[in-house]
Image (cartoon, rainbow, N blue to C red):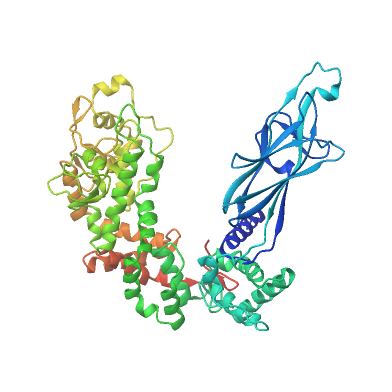
Amino acid sequence: MPPILMEKYMSAAEKVLNLAIVVDAMPKARTNQFDAVDLDGTAPGGPSSENMRSLNREGDVYVSYDFPDDAEYVLRVRAYGQQAGPEVVRMALLIDDREIQRFDVRAEQERPEVYEARVKLAAGRKKFAAAYLNNYINPKDPDPKKRDRNLIIDYLEIVVPAATKPRPLPESHQRIFICQPIPGRERECAQKILGHFARRAYRRQVAAEEIARLVKLAEFAGKQERSFERGIQVALQAVLVSPHFLFRGELQPDPNNPQSIHPVNEYALASRLSYFLWSSMPDEELFSQAERGTLRRNLPAEVRRMLKDPKSRALVKNFAGQWLQIHNLQLVTPDKQTFPGYDDELGAAMAMESELFFEAIMREDRSVLEFLDADYTFLNERLAKHYGIEGVQGTDFRRVSTKGSRRGGVLTQASILTLTSNPTRTSPVKRGKWVLENLLGTPPPPPPPDVPELNEGKEAVLAGTLRQRMEQHRENPNCATCHARMDPIGFGLENFDGIGAWREKDGAFLVDPSGRLVSAESFQGPADLKMILLKVKKQEFTRCISEKMLTYALGRGLEFYDKCAIDQISKGLAKNRHKFSNLIMEVVKSAPFQMSRGEGKGLAGASP
């Protein structure tokens, strides 16, 4: 790990624990000093010879500070003035640009003075500033020392009073401190706190010697600062920068045989399962099952429970976002002149439709074949109007029947159709390539170098449809092989324009959505194309989605030796009416998910 990354982890752990833990519930009075050279400010000027801040025009210097309680605070400024003109230097102390008190600054460079104000403030983040009020310049004065009036600031100071009642402990503090220390038995309480926290952070049982090291660190830090809470805070910081927390490492049962192949233990299985379905650490139920050694035999029930849990929304956002490439919709910028109806609101609605559609299949345990064709979708008024579907009002999304319409399945959703278009027009190549890669699992090879671009000139556009121009372009023998696989699929979706709206014409020409696949199936439009995918290409689709889901679950690319697992998952999926839960269960039961190969020195399969 690069040292700078380790420093950032350390800093993050410190910030998090400072927020999570109250070290001193009854803090004593304290003074916070902020040197002027480190302050922000609106006044022009710079450091003086003593590293103080010179304000050469009206303006201020300030600090933003979190006032901890509703209380009376003492605000101080150490300053002096460079006098000139008929008035003395004037300064005001401000809180959030509201003047608290004004001062005549008569002090001179040899003897700066401290100017003080008392003010009652509510708790919260506020801006404390010292402002220069009356600048003066007279370059014609015969005395050089009287030509320019300035305010010189040394430091700002905030005196926080002692607390009169204990500060409320946040929920995070209460969840961490599962016991309170009894005099003479602090070590026993520290062991409970650190053991409980480390078990969750490391996602496994924690050895006694690991807890002992953390307790020793907590005791040392606690003695240094005379605070049990501070000692625990330091020890927990060590936990949060440990490789056992930062990486999903899995302990090998036989570290002396790094080439051994073995089932992962139940704690590792719980982690694999939770990061697969929730993108987060295991919950207490998974921990308990792993601790009792019952997780592996109760996997079907646990998978069903986890899919019903709201945290499975992460599978929608992350897997669907990657598989369908919905994440990339934020990067799409359709041309405003060509598609004036497109804006960020419509783009967000497109992404939401696809996410809600995926979530419905997951939550209702429907067939994964409905990704290819379904008689429902999820729309709000804006997207329904874009589709030409009536009867949908308001900004909220609701389930809408697509029977009798041209929509159904991901291929006719505007998110996919927009993603696979160019800014000014559709792209049959991109659409065909997307289907081959994401629905059929047969991606085309990369294009050969020096392939000429399609003629996009005005004369070419007026001469024929995009399809006609592409067919001429495809006469190049270097292009024909791959384009013969991609283009017919893309042509079948040409009735949808560059942002997924239905059209009958491409410019002045009628759209021809018919085509013939290299496997000899013919179709007359998008409805026929979907039926071919659903009936003829069903096996290719189930294998493709099995590959995508296993890749996501493992967090790595698939290798040649994963082929048997893919075969088993896709066959198992077909046996149970292609239900979504069966896809998940087949992935979870597969050898790559259940097994591990040793990789040396006791820690295998580490991933951040």
Decide if residue 316 is on the left or right side of residue 534.
Answer: right
- In the figure, 38 relative to 167: above or below? above
In front of the other: 508 or 448: 508
| Number of marks | 0
Q: Position of residue 417 (x, y in %)?
A: 29, 41
- In the figure, 208 relative to 145: above or below? below
Identify the image quadrant of the N terminus: bottom right
Residue for point 82% across, 37% down: 107
In front of the other: 199 or 504: 199
Taking the image as drawn, is residue 481 in sight?
no
Residue for point 41% across, 64% down: 276
In front of the other: 489 or 109: 109
Q: Position of residue 336 (x, y in %)?
A: 34, 29
Q: Position of residue 222 (x, y in %)?
A: 70, 72
In front of the other: 85 or 383: 85
Taking the image as drawn, is residue 70 in sight?
yes
Q: Position of residue 368 (x, y in %)?
A: 25, 59
Decide if residue 248 is on the left or right side of residue 582.
Answer: right
